Amino acid sequence: TRGQCAETRCQGMNLDELLDHLEAVLGLGHPPRRLRDLIEGELTGLFGLPPIRAAEQAEAIEVRVAMRIEQRAAKATAGGGVPALVLLGSSVPTVAGSCYVLPTDAPEVVAAKIGRRHVQALLAAIQELTFTDFEKFGARVLSELGARSAFVTPRSSDQGIDFYGVISLAARGASAVS
């Protein structure tokens, strides 16, 4: 039956697979939702479990999923990245996109969260650039940072400098180092 097939698929489920799907569905800016409800919805929709079985399974794995969210968030932060999800609350685990703006966030935190929403898409776009396009991009970034001139060096296989720029530190407010 359909229910037995879904049970077999769910038993072979990997928590990381479930969490990958939650991250993809929720994204960075998703508002807070109860973690158990999200898990239950995914077990029903993704794995085809009947609602009562999905509720039981969600209750059974909620703590492990919460721990995995915290582990992923710590790893992303330690690596200089942006975690996809964060946990809010402890008695009733609630999950939100890490860039969701909370009413209690200070203005500087709001600005940082809004700015981080585009990090993953920007990183993916940069990673898709060809070597030549990346060199042009790097030179353009130097220009945007205030370089009087930015250059892309001729193509070679010397593992050397591919682009460079001239920036006046005095014009940027830097003082002389003694």
Image (cartoon, rainbow, N blue to C red):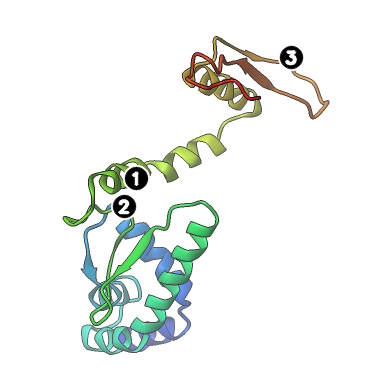
Residue 104 x, y percent position in the rendering: 18, 57
Q: Give the x, y percent position of residue 89.
A: 25, 74
Residue 1 shows in the view: no
Residue marked by disc 2: 99
**Which amino acid type is marked by label 3?**
Pro
Question: Which residue is at the far left?
Answer: 103
Q: Is residue 41 toward the left or the right of residue 129 in the image?
A: left
Task: Name the residue rendered at 74%, 14% in the picture.
Answer: 154
In the drawing, what numbered circle is on residue 154?
A: 3
The residue lying furthest to the front in this view is 178
- Secondary element at tag 3: loop
Q: Which residue extends farthest top? A: 148
Depth check, front residue: 42 or 9: 42
**Horizontal relation, residue 81 to residue 151: left or right:** left
Q: Are marks 1 and 2 in contact (CB under 8 Å)?
A: yes
Residue at coordinates 41% horizontally, 82% vertically from top-left?
Answer: 64
Q: Amino acid at mark 1?
A: Arg
> In screen coordinates, is 25 left or right of 14?
left
For image coordinates 37% across by 76% down, the residue present is 66
Return the residue at label 1: 117
Residue 56 in view: yes
Q: Residue 21: x, y in percent?
A: 39, 64
Mark 1 surroundings within 10 Å by alpha-carbon count, few (fewer than 14), some (14 through 19), many (20 or more): some
Whichever of callouts 2 and 3 sits on the residue coming sooner in the sequence is 2
Q: CA distance from mark 1 to mark 3?
A: 35 Å
